[in-house]
C-alpha cells in the first residue's frame, strides 16, 4: 500500500513543479495561446460544416428542369449519377421511352418492340442504383410491370410473367392503395379469356408507318361512295344566284314557275278594285224619282 501512495505523491510534486515553472511563460504568451486555440477550433468547425454539406447541384438541377425528351433526361442523369437528381432524371427517361414504345406498337411494331427493350434496360439501370426513394422504387416496379404486360401474347407463360410483375407491386408497397388497386385490376383482367384472346391477336399484328390505319384493310377502293342527299335552300326562290352549288339548268326550269304567281297578281286585283264601283250604280235611279 505504501508504494502507490509514494508514486502518487511523486506525481503531485512533479505537476506542482511544472505549473510553478510554466507560470512566467503562461503570463507572457497566454493571450496568444488562447487566440491560437480559438482559431484552430473555428477552422475545425468550418471544415466539419463544409464536409457535411451536399455538393453543389445548380447545373444538374438546371438540366433536369429544362429536360423535355428522353435524351435530355438521359443527359441530366449522366451528369449526376447516384444522386437524387440523377435517379429522378433516369426514372423520367425510362417512363418517356416506355410511353413512346406503347404508342409505337400501334403504328410501327418494329420500333415499338425496340423501344420496349430500351425502356427495360433503362429501368434495370435505375434498379442498380443505390439510395432510391420509395417513390422512385414504386414507379420503377410499376414500369416493369407495364412492360411485362405489353409483351404478353396470350400464352400461359407470358400471362404468368405479367401477373407476377403486377403482384410484385402489391407485395412491395401494400400501403399504396392507388397502385395496389391498379395491380389487382390488371391481374383480374389478365386472368380473363377475352384479354388473353386480345393479346394473342394483337401480337400477330405488324403495323407499319406506310399503312393507312384510318381505312379498312381492303383498301379505299371498296369503300362505298357517300350518297348525295337533296338539300332545301329557303333562298332559292328569291334569287338563283344564292345557290352556287346547284346545276346551271335547274334555275332556268324553275324560273317560269316562280314568275306565274307574279303574272296572276294584277288579274286578281282588277276585279277587287271594280267591285265598289258596281255597288254605287243603284244611286242613279233614286235621283230620277225625285
Image: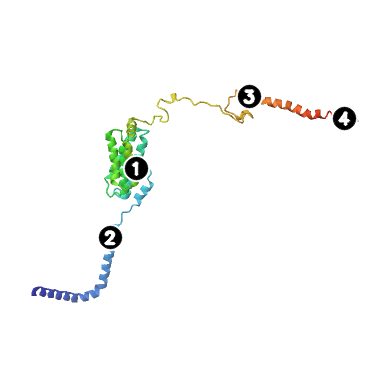
Disc 2 residue crowd, few under 14, some 14–19, many 20+, Cα 10 Å:
few
Disc 1 residue crowd, few under 14, some 14–19, many 20+, Cα 10 Å:
some
Secondary structure under the numbered disc 1 in the rendered image: helix
Contact (Cβ within 8 Å) of mark 4 with mark 3: no
Contact (Cβ within 8 Å) of mark 4 with mark 1: no
Contact (Cβ within 8 Å) of mark 1 with mark 2: no
Q: CA distance from mark 4 to mark 2?
A: 139 Å
Q: Nearer the viewer, mark 2 or mark 3?
A: 3
Q: Position of residue 175 (x, y in %)?
A: 31, 48
Q: Which residue is mark 3?
A: 254
Q: Which residue is mark 2?
A: 48
Q: Earlier in the sequence, mark 3 or mark 1?
A: 1
Disc 3 residue crowd, few under 14, some 14–19, many 20+, Cα 10 Å:
few
Q: Nearer the viewer, residue 11 or 266?
A: 266
How many numbered callouts?
A: 4
Q: CA distance from mark 1 to mark 2?
A: 47 Å
Residue furthest to the right in view is: 290
Secondary structure under the numbered disc 4 in the rendered image: helix
Q: Position of residue 129 (x, y in %)?
A: 27, 47
Q: CA distance from mark 3 to mark 1?
A: 68 Å
Amino acid at each position: 500500500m505504501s508504494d502507490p501512495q509514494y508514486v502518487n505523491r511523486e506525481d503531485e510534486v512533479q505537476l506542482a513543479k511544472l505549473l510553478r515553472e510554466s507560470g512566467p511563460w503562461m503570463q507572457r504568451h497566454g493571450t496568444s495561446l488562447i487566440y491560437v486555440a480559438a482559431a484552430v477550433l473555428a477552422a475545425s468547425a468550418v471544415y466539419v460544416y463544409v464536409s457535411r454539406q451536399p455538393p453543389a447541384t445548380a447545373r444538374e438541377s438546371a438540366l433536369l428542369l429544362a429536360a423535355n425528351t428522353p435524351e435530355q433526361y438521359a443527359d441530366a442523369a449522366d451528369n449526376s449519377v447516384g444522386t437524387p437528381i440523377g435517379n429522378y432524371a433516369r426514372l423520367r427517361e425510362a417512363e418517356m421511352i416506355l410511353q413512346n414504345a406503347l404508342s409505337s406498337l400501334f403504328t410501327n411494331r418494329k420500333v415499338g418492340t425496340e423501344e420496349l427493350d430500351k425502356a427495360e434496360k433503362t429501368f434495370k439501370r435505375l434498379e442498380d442504383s443505390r439510395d432510391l426513394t420509395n417513390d422512385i422504387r414504386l414507379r420503377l416496379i410499376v414500369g416493369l410491370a407495364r412492360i411485362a404486360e405489353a409483351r404478353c401474347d396470350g400464352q400461359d407463360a407470358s400471362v404468368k410473367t405479367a401477373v407476377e410483375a403486377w403482384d410484385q407491386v402489391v407485395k412491395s408497397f401494400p400501403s399504396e392503395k392507388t397502385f395496389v388497386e391498379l395491380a389487382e385490376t390488371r391481374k383480374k383482367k389478365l386472368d380473363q379469356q377475352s384479354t388473353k384472346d386480345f393479346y394473342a391477336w394483337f401480337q400477330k399484328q405488324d403495323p407499319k408507318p406506310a399503312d393507312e390505319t384510318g381505312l379498312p384493310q381492303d383498301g379505299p377502293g371498296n369503300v362505298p361512295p357517300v350518297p348525295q342527299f337533296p338539300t332545301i335552300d329557303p333562298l332559292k326562290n328569291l334569287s338563283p344566284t344564292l345557290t352556287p352549288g346547284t346545276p346551271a339548268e335547274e334555275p332556268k326550269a324553275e324560273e317560269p314557275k316562280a314568275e306565274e304567281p307574279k303574272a296572276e297578281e294584277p288579274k286578281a286585283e282588277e276585279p277587287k278594285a271594280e267591285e265598289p264601283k258596281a255597288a254605287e250604280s243603284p244611286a242613279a235611279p233614286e235621283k230620277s224619282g225625285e
